[in-house]
Image: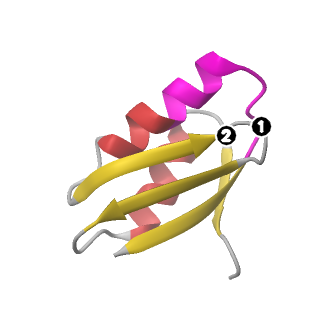
Amino acid sequence: MSIQLNVSGMTCGHCETAVAKALKGIEGVQAVQVDLKNGTAKVEGQNVNTQALIAAVIDEGYGASIAGA
């Protein structure tokens, strides 16, 4: 299962790392790729709760939404 997120508010490598770490902490997530330049995050995993992903990014102080939603 692959989920693409739009992430707003990232300005540097630290931001990119913080978002990746937050997403990796969600149950079922197996891999995360965060793209600072494009403001996206790709999450791979099984039975991942998309609302939990969004909440984790927001808790880090960034905006998040499901791409294409």
Compare residues 16 and 26 and report the one nearer the observer. Answer: 16
Highlighted range, magenta: 8-19
- Labels 2 and 1: the sequence-earlier one: 1
Marks 2 & 1, CB-CB < 8 Å contact: yes
* Residue identifier under label 2: 62
Residue 31 is situated, as x and y percent measured from the top left of the image, at: 33, 50
13 part of magenta stretch: yes
Checking the image for residue 67, the label placed there is: none
Image side of residue 32 versus residue 30, left or right: right
- Colour scheme of the picture: secondary structure
Give the quadrant of residue 5. bottom right
Q: Residue at the location (60% across, 17% down)? A: 14
45 sits to left or right of 9 = left
In the depicted view, which residue is nearer to us: 50 or 30? Answer: 30
Q: Quadrant of the N terminus?
A: bottom left
**Helix, strand or loop for disc 1:** loop
The residue pinned by badge 1 equals: 9
Looking at the image, which residue is at 51% across and 57% down?
42
Q: Residue at x 21, y 55 (%)?
A: 27
- Within 10 Å of the Cα at label 1, are there few (<14), some (14-19), or many (20+) other Cα atoms? few
